[in-house]
Image: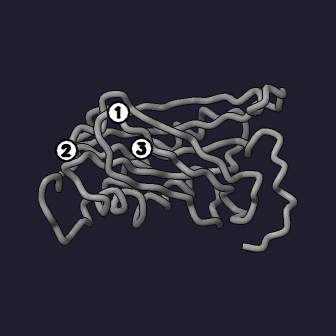
Amino acid sequence: MDIRKTLLIKEVLETDGAGKACTPIVRVAAIAVIRNPFAGRFVEDLSPLFDMGGALGERLMADAVGMLSGPPVSYGKAALVGVAGDLEHGGAMIHPKLGKPMRAAVNGGKALIASNAKVGAVGASIDLPLGHKDEAWSFAHFDTMTLMVGDAPRPDEIVLCMAVADGGRPHPRVGNAPITD
């Protein structure tokens, strides 16, 4: 695996969108920028990307969780594939093997890990969805962390993103709504 760089981004929310103060909520993203070994060509067997995703989860998730102020309650993952790659390359990074080290790092993970993948140019952003690690229908924890790396992904790269949070949205007001969808 050819890693160009890794980043840890810590975001602390201290107010809601209207400026009303809240108990601080910490969200941390762990990001790796790697060379896509399959850029520019069709390959049937993407299992090397499965392994890379798992290895990066093992390498980065403990650091992300360690930067939280409280215990992790939400998590999510995303991949941004450079334009010489394929959307399936991002899916291969985030799905088969990344979940296990993420669940280990958060001490749980009964709920599906929310995810997103897309192809984009250098400097593109990706919306990483967050959801409660154990309660799939906790509306108060449905959230998004928008991430980008200014010089990535280059056409032959993949930006792998994982995030954890120690809280849901500030002042959630849809958490008690009846589920009809």
- Secondary structure at badge 1 equals loop
Residue hosting label 3: 59
Q: Is residue 38 left or right of residue 16?
A: left
Query: Does the CB distance between marks 2 and 3 fall below 8 Å?
Result: no
Q: Secondary structure at mark 2?
A: loop
The mark tally for this picture is: 3
Name which residue type carries label 2: Asp
Q: CA distance from mark 3 to mark 1?
A: 24 Å
Horizontal arrangement in the rendering, residue 95 relative to residue 25 (left or right) = left
Label 1 or label 2, whichever comes before in sequence order? 1
Q: Nearer the viewer, mark 3 or mark 1?
A: 1
How far across and down, in percent of the image, does residue 132 sit? 68, 56
- Callout 3 crowding tier (Cα within 10 Å): few <14, some 14–19, many ≥20: some
* Mark 2 or mark 3, whichever is nearer to me: 2
- Marks 1 and 2, Cα distance to the nearest angstrom? 14 Å
Q: Mark 1 is on which residue type? A: Gly
Q: Earlier in the sequence, mark 3 or mark 1?
A: 3
The residue under label 3 is which amino acid type?
Arg
Q: Is residue 113 above or below residue 167?
A: below
Q: Quadrant of the C terminus?
A: bottom right
Residue 6 at x, y = what percent? Answer: 37, 33
Q: Secondary structure at mark 3?
A: helix
Residue at image location 73% in from the left, 46% down from the top = 168
Q: What residue is drawn where x is 37% and y is 40%?
A: 32
Estimate the spatial distance between the alpha carbons at disc 2 and disc 3, rounded to whole Å.
Answer: 22 Å
Q: Is residue 38 above or below residue 151?
A: below
Mark 1: few, some, or many residues within 10 Å (few <14, many ≥20)? some
Residue 71: % across, % down: 71, 43
- Check the image and name the residue furthest to the right: 176
Mark 2, residue position: 156
Q: Quadrant of residue 11?
A: top right
Mark 1, residue position: 123
